[in-house]
Amino acid sequence: MPSDTPFLKGDKISLRAFRQSDLEAYKTWLDNEEVTHFLEMGARPTRENDCGAFLQMAETSDDSIVFAITESGNDIPIGTCGLYLIQWVCRRAQLNILVGEPSAWDKGYGSEAVTLLVKYGFYKLNLNSIQLGVNADNQRAIKSYEKGGFVHEGRRRQMIFRNNRYYDVVEMSVLRSEYDEMSLN
């Protein structure tokens, strides 16, 4: 029986290892047009192989650390997040997050997950830089990342095709020195 003990704990949410029992929820999120509205995911129904590949990566990859997001005091997943493409020598990673349960939106869960991941990345993994790319029209996500200390680095034009149109991607990052300074204030 898997442990319900969170690996990282915030006020509203906890982050624990992503496990096989989370795959059904994960598949539901990827097949929900509302959830994937701003994402590259959702172009076709999610296949069992897609879920299997994600689980295998979560359980075996040395350059990714994947979490399930749960509400505090509850073990039911509401999303997933993690640090991916970790470059141990360069001390950098890419942050990805998906709050998949629409009922969990606009409660600050995404912002808290970003804060927990950034703190974990800098103070536990000794990373120096964490980056991400976000659909330029996804203002909810951009505000969440800005709260976590991310700054705008640039824009990649017409990077995502979704909803019968092209979207720009905003590139953002946070450096450990910036995060340290932000934490002091």
Image (cartoon, helix red, strand yellow):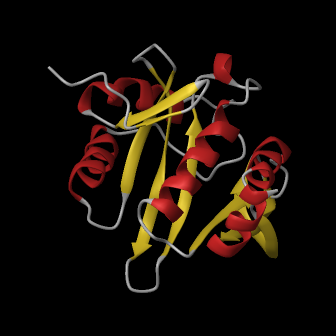
Residue furthest front in the image: 184
**Residue sitting farthest toward the left:** 1
Q: Quadrant of residue 67?
A: top left
The residue closer to the viewer here, 100 or 50, is 100
Q: Is 39 above or below relative to 157?
A: above
Say left or right for 99 vs 148: left
* Residue at (56, 58) in percent of width and height: 95
**Residue 154 location, quadrant:** bottom right
Number of dots carrying numbers: 0
Q: Residue at 69% of width from left, 69% of height from top?
A: 173
x, y percentage for residue 40? Answer: 61, 53
Q: Position of residue 31 (x, y in %)?
A: 52, 31
Which quarter of the rendering shows the N terminus?
top left
| Location of residue 91 with respect to 53 vertically, above or below | below
- Is 179 situated left or right of 61 in this image? right
Q: Could you tell me which quadrant the C terminus lies in? A: bottom right
Residue drawn where x is 49% and y is 61% of the image: 123
Going 28% across and 44% down the picture, which residue do you hit? Answer: 55
**Among all residues in the image, which is located at the extreme bottom?**
89
User: Is 18 in front, or is 27?
Assistant: 18
Compared to residue 163, the image places residue 89 above or below, namely below
Image spot of residue 60 (x, y percent): 20, 56
Foreground pick, 73 / 80 = 73
Using residue 151 as the reference point, say whether residue 26 is left or right of it: left
The percent position of residue 136, horizontal first and vertical second, equals 83, 58
